[in-house]
Image: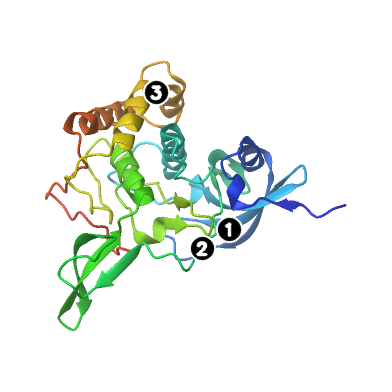
Amino acid sequence: MPAPERIPTGRVSTVDVLTLLAKGEITVRGRLREASNAVLYCSVAHEGDEAHCVYKPIAGERPLWDFPDGTLAQREVAAYELSEATGWGLVPPTVLRDGPYGQGMVQLWIEADPEAALLALVEDEEPGEGWKAVGFADVGEGRTALLVHADDERLRRLAVLDAVINNGDRKGGHLLPTVDGALYAIDHGVTFNTEDKLRTLLWGWAGEPLSAEATETLTSVAAALTDGAPLATRLAELLTAAEVAAVRARVAALLASGAHPVPSGEWPAIPWPPV
């Protein structure tokens, strides 16, 4: 019997990968112990294809007092659905299915390029060319450094997506640039709250006008969120009615303002730890 074919990163947007994730046999290979919830590193195989994936069983989730409805796994899948609706492909293929420890989220494993630099701490007062300032950070011994992120269109798209899904935890470790030039983002369990909880490292564009591409994309997403549209129907299966209504409201607010959101000032705008 020939060895199963490994699915390369370049095929992550194909229907075949979703079928593999949804129907394949999952084998647990290990656990990512640094995660606060159960995160299992697995392989999944189906009809001669095989890939590595992450499996997060709902049974391993810790309750969150400010997210009383739904599950982390459902919100992870909803974030993938919104990402696909933008056409930007920022979230790896993600499905909700039964696994070895019950229902959970299964997501294609993405190998990040260790040489790609999207974040940095610099000693200058202003960011250099090609970088956007986030803010000053304490680096110990009474010293501070300027936290910056790349002035990268992929990150700018992600900043827009995070505003739509109300991401409460966009850390540097959630950014996975690949050697083929793609950018993926992971860990979307703390999203879609009806209250404003945006906390992110991607504040470099705060208050700046949205790009023409972002405006066009948000207009398309708004249409896809109308009652009865496939996206709206799918989100209704994963989120509460109030959460879906909040998504519509956030898209409408972005289009009305025509600008990237700014920190509210009511809570820390940057997640901790930032990476």
Which quadrant is the C terminus positioned in?
Answer: bottom left
- Residues 27 and 204: in front is 204
- Residues 135 and 21: in front is 135
Image: 127 above or below 45: below
Q: Position of residue 257 (x, y in %)?
A: 17, 33
The residue shown at (36%, 19%) is: 226
Whether label 1 touches label 2, CB < 8 Å: yes
The residue singled out by tag 1 in the image is: 41
Q: Relative to 31, is 118 on the left or the right?
A: left
Q: Is residue 84 visible?
A: yes
Q: Which amino acid does label 2 sit on?
A: Leu
Q: Label 2 crowding class (10 Å Cα cut-off): few <14, some 14-19, many 20+?
A: few
Q: Position of residue 49 (x, y in %)?
A: 73, 47
Q: Residue furthest left?
A: 265
Q: Relative to 77, is 52 on the left or the right?
A: right
Residue 32 circle label: 2
Q: Find the distance from the CA under tag 3 to the CA under tag 1.
A: 33 Å
Of mark 2 and mark 3, the one earlier in the sequence is: 2
Q: Relative to 175, is 268 on the left or the right?
A: left
Of mark 3 and mark 1, the one earlier in the sequence is: 1
